[in-house]
Each structure stands twice: as structure tokens, then as C-alpha cells.
Amino acid sequence: MKIMILGADGYLGWPTAVDLAFKGYNLMLVDNYLKRKLMSKYKKKPLVSSPKLNKKVSLLNKRKCNVDYSNIDCTKFINLNKLVASFKPDAVIHYAELPSAPYSMIGYDESWTTLQNNLQTTLNLIWSIKNLKKSCHIIKLGTMGEYGTPNIDIEEGWINIKHNGRKDKFMYPRQASSLYHTSKIMDTDLLWFYVRMFQMQVTDLMQGPVYGILENEFMEINNLHNTYSYDEIFGTVLNRFIVQATTKQPLTVYGSGNQIRGYINIKDCLKCIELAIKNPPDNGDMNIYNQFTEQFSVNQLAYKIKKALKKIDIDVVITKINNPRKEKEKHYYNAKNNSLMKLGLKPTLLTNDEIIKIAQYVLKYKKNIDKSIINPKTKWV
């Protein structure tokens, strides 16, 4: 299969590329390094730096992989359209969006950059596929944050409604708590509109916060690490907590710590992507899967880390700080996640051993950690 990966330089994009390349897929990697530029602008940096795609692709192809790359801006329709026309992908994995709720809430410029980048890229991809190869399967990374925290169970994308004696099936209501998550709702609506109108094939993966590292010999020996971010803008909570723990800083729990979300190990993200590739919807259908494996409150995460790292003689302190976000801190949360399990996903659970593996990776590069970028400076209100 010929697969195009948009946003192939990122925390998920690069591991996905390595995983699929060694499984024999013919890949076109696409990235314009916007996230790198923003991290530099806001003085954030990943745990370990990594070369750009030209060097990465060269090393992959020395291992007899079939990979190419293109440095284009996907918000420019003519660029993306030309690339789709020449490569003719069987599937496109769409990671090319700014993945940060805090960034989207900094100010007007950041909010507009988030909307413009995310929505224009999605619309350009839709039109390129619609015009050039409608049989191509679009796999878009969505987010569980689209749903918010409703006081009812969260179904997988769809909900059956009975009203005044009649019934129908609708897309599950969304109510995000950041502009970034709102942009992802708009993505979903755009994709569903074009699926209905033009009989396209789309899978939307509603992913929870991701944590962890990919244990891959090729990436390790060539220093081609994925971008493990731990700062307050681009770092996810569990990755950030482990960096705090290994540098003997308190784990900073926002507000009450009772906020519940669905979490997933990065290794399982890659499994879900391949399951989506191998199980495309019919023309005119849209698969929506809730892509997480376990639900925890922030307090539960913090105490899991404390318990696990005690086994390697790291004493963890947990502290609560004023919540910089505007969100419900005590709420009902019960999201369904059966579909990917039925397709064959065997979850990697957040055990003590998994936490210790991540901590040992962080300790290996401890000298790179900048403690000043961890605590929140961005406030929703």
C-alpha cells in the first residue's frame, strides 16, 4: 500500500513512519516543521533533539525501506494537491495539526494560527482526495477532548436519539474546553459533511492523551528519537509528571486533580493506526473509534507514578496548584472504547514496569531537561 503521512516529523508521526516502513509500506512523509518553529519561538524544547526528515528518510532507505518525503505547507492547496496527484496514496494519515490546547489559548494570534492551520489543512486534504482519488482512505487523528465531559456515557462517535416518539442516529454531541479541541470538532464536521456528500472513506480516531516512548532499535542506534515534549504547552500530563519526578520536582496537579480522561501508550497508538489501515470503511461511511485504553483521574496518575518510581528509589512529592485551565474538576466520565479491541487491539496497560521504562529513558537524557519550561504560564481566563 502507498501511504502518505502528514505531520510525519512529530511525536506520533515519526514513530508511525518507522513502524510502517519496516512493515513494507510505501510511504510519503510530509512536514513543514511548524511545530519545531513554534517550539523555538516559545523557547520550548523536546527531551532529545532529532534530525529533520531528509536525514531520517535516508537512514530508513539504507535499511531497504521505501520512503520519500516532501517539505510542503499543507495549508497551501496547490502544494498538497500536486503531491497527492503524483503519489496517488491508498491512505492518508492526517497528523498535520497543531496539537496543543494551551498554545491555542495564549492569545489571538495563536488562536487564529490553530484554526487556520488545522482547518485549512483538513479542507485541502479533503478536496485533494475528492478530486484526485476518492477511493483513498483518510485516517485523521481526532481527540477525546472533542466530547468534553458530558454527564452521560460517551459513545464511540454516534448516538441514537429518541425524541417525541421518533428516533434517529446522530454524531455524538461535542463541547470542547479549548480552542484546539474546538478546531478538531470542526475537522470532524467537515469530514462527515464530505463523506455524506461525496461518498468518501474516513476513519476518525478520537485519541486520549498519549504517553510513553517507542522502544525501537533503529531509532535508538541512529539517535532518531521521537519528540518527547514535557513543557507546559506541548507536553502531555504523564510525560511531564515523569520528567518532574526524575528531576526531584513536585508533580504539579492542576486544581483538584479529579479530572478524568482516557489515556493510551504510544505503542498502542501505532497498533490502532495499522488496524485503521487494514479495516477501511465503505464508501460513504465514517468510522469513529475512541482511541484510549484506560481511564484515570490526574490524582490517580500522580499516585501511580509515585508508587512505581519508589521501586527505583525515586521519592515523588505531589502538590496541587491553581488550575490554569477552565474545566470541570469534578465530573462524570465513562467513555466507550470497544471497537478497536474488537478489531484486535491488545492494550499496553500503565503498569509499574511501563512507568519505570519511561523514567529510565528520561533519566538517560536528564542533562537536557530545562526545569523552567514545565510549570504552566498559559491561563484560559
Image: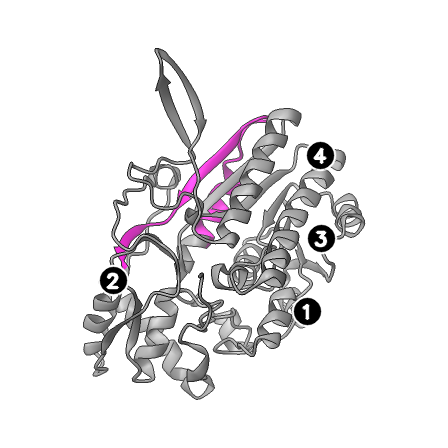
**In the drawing, does residue 88 fall left or right of residue 376?**
right
Judge depth for marks 2 and 1 and give the one in front.
2
Judge depth for marks 3 and 4 and give the one in front.
3
Mark 1 touching mark 3, by CB under 8 A? Answer: no
Question: In this figure, which residue is indicated by the disc labeled 2?
Answer: 256
In the picture as drawn, the residue positioned furthest to the front comes out as: 381
Earlier residue among tags 2 and 3: 3
What distance separates the C-alpha of mark 1 from that of mark 4?
Answer: 32 Å
The image's colour scheme reads one colour
Q: Residues within 10 Å of mark 1 (few under 14, many from 20)?
A: some
Q: Residues within 10 Å of mark 4 (few under 14, many from 20)?
A: some
What distance separates the C-alpha of mark 1 from that of mark 3?
Answer: 26 Å
- Residue toward you, 217 or 249: 249
Image point 60% across, 31% down: which residue?
193
What distance separates the C-alpha of mark 2 from that of mark 3?
Answer: 39 Å
Image point 42% across, 49% down: which residue?
145
| Amino acid type for the residue under numbered disc 2 | Ser
Q: Position of residue 125 (x, y in %)?
A: 68, 44
Q: Quadrant of residue 89?
A: top right
Earlier residue among tags 1 and 3: 1
Give the numbered dot on residue 75: 3
Residue 233: say if magenta. Answer: no
What distance separates the C-alpha of mark 3 from that of mark 4?
Answer: 16 Å
Relative to 97, is 343 above or below? above
Question: In this figure, which residue is indicated by the disc labeled 4?
Answer: 130
Question: In this figure, which residue is indicated by the disc labeled 1?
Answer: 58
Mark 2 touching mark 3, by CB under 8 A? Answer: no
Quarter of the C terminus within the rendering: bottom left
| Amino acid type for the residue under numbered disc 3 | Thr
Task: Tell me the magenta residue range.
Answer: 270-297
